[in-house]
Image: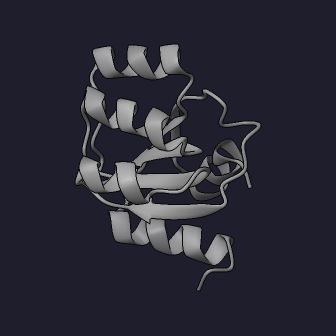
Amino acid sequence: MTPVEFAGKYGLTVVTEGGGSCREIEGAYCCDLLSMVMGRAQENDAFVTVMANVNTIAVAVLADVACVILCEGIHFDEACILRAKQQEVCVLESEKSAFAVALLLGKELGLC
C-alpha cells in the first residue's frame, strides 16, 4: 500500500505527496529521537513521529523512508513543508496517536 492510499483509507491528510503515490510502505518505525531513526529505520518504512522540525525531513531523506506521519494533530511549519517538497518527502498528518497509527500500519501490513 502506498502512503497516499494509506492516507485515503484511514483519513490522514496528505501534506506533501513526494513519492507517496508510487512508493510502497513495507514497514513502520515509530520514534521521536532522530538519531535512533537514522540508524534503525528501514528503507520504505513509514516513519511515525510527533517531531515536527526540519531535521525530521533530513532524517527521512537519510533513512529513505516511504513517508513521515505526524501524529497527535501536530503540523510542520511552512519552512519544513517547503523542504519536504524540495526533497520529495511524502508527509502525512493524523489526529490519532502514534500508537493508533502504528497499529493501523501493523494491521495493514500484516505485522500484527
Decide if residue 14 is on the left or right side of residue 108: left
Q: Which residue lies furthest to the front in this view?
A: 39
Asked if residue 95 shows in the view, the reply is no
Give the residue drawn at x 35%, y 63%. 98
Asked if residue 89 shows in the view, the reply is yes
- Please state the total of marks drawn on the protein image: 0
Give the residue drawn at x 27%, y 23%. 77
Residue 20 in the image: above or below residue 87: below
Image quadrant assignment for residue 112: bottom right
- The quarter of the rendered structure image containing the N terminus is bottom right
Q: Which residue lies furthest to the bottom in this view?
A: 112
Give the residue drawn at x 60%, y 29%. 17
The residue closer to the viewer here, 79 or 87, is: 87
Question: How far across and how far down the image is residue 65, in percent?
Answer: 54, 45
Question: How far across and how far down the image is residue 26, in percent?
Answer: 66, 60
Give the residue drawn at x 52%, y 63%. 28
Question: How far across and how far down the image is residue 106, in percent?
Answer: 57, 74
The residue closer to the viewer here, 52 or 94, is: 52
Colouring chosen for the image of the structure: one colour
Decide if residue 105 is on the left or right side of residue 54: right
Question: How far across and how far down the image is residue 94, in percent?
Answer: 41, 50
Residue 56 in the image: above or below residue 12: above
The residue closer to the viewer here, 79 or 95, is: 79
Residue 37 in the image: above or below residue 111: above
Image quadrant assignment for residue 31: bottom left
